[in-house]
Amino acid sequence: MTLNAPDHVELWQSVWTASVFDHAQGTTLRAAVRGERLPYELTREVSVDPHEPVVRFRFHLVHTGG
């Protein structure tokens, strides 16, 4: 399959869902998006540690196609 699209263009133009929550390890912003041209779901989290000057980034990509 050939996909004629610039790198990341679908991610920049998509509508993301987002939430912020507190937990024992700090505060996390979680955002997710589902692919429109390709079958995937991407979740990214940015967490801030309440006790240390640390920011953690986590990405989770799932293929949702057959």
Image: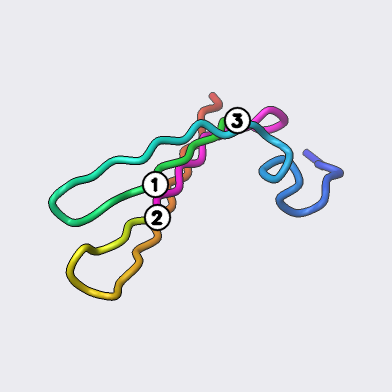
* Residue closer to the observer: 48 or 7: 48
Q: How many other residues sit within 10 Å of disc 1, few (<14), some (14-19) or many (≥20)?
A: some
Amino acid type, callout 3: Pro
Q: Is label 3 in contact with label 1 (beta carbons under 8 Å)?
A: no
Identify which residue is drawn at 40% across, 42% down: 30
Q: Check the image and name the residue furthest to the right.
A: 4
Residue 51 position (above or below residue 46): below
Instruction: State how far apart marks 2 and 3 are (Cα).
Output: 24 Å
* Residue closer to the observer: 64 or 1: 64
Residue located beneath label 2 in the image:
46
- Residue 52 marker: none
Amino acid type, callout 2: Val
Identify which residue is drawn at 42% across, 47% down: 60
Chain part drawn in magenta: 35-45
The secondary structure type at the circle numbered 1 is strand
- Residue 29 marker: 1
* Residue closer to the observer: 9 or 48: 48
Q: Is label 1 in contact with label 2 (beta carbons under 8 Å)?
A: yes
Amino acid type, callout 1: Leu
Q: Check the image and name the residue furthest to the front.
A: 50
Which callout, 2 or 3, points at the residue further toward the start of the chain?
Answer: 3
Where's the C terminus, which quadrant? top right
* Residue closer to the observer: 33 or 61: 33
- Please indicate whether residue 65 sits to the left or right of residue 45 in the image: right
Q: Position of residue 40 (x, y in %)?
A: 56, 34
Residue located beneath label 3 in the image:
39
Q: Check the image and name the residue furthest to the bottom.
A: 53
* Magenta stretch holds residue 43: yes
Identify which residue is drawn at 60% across, 30% down: 39
Q: How many other residues sit within 10 Å of disc 2, few (<14), some (14-19) or many (≥20)?
A: some
The secondary structure type at the circle numbered 3 is loop
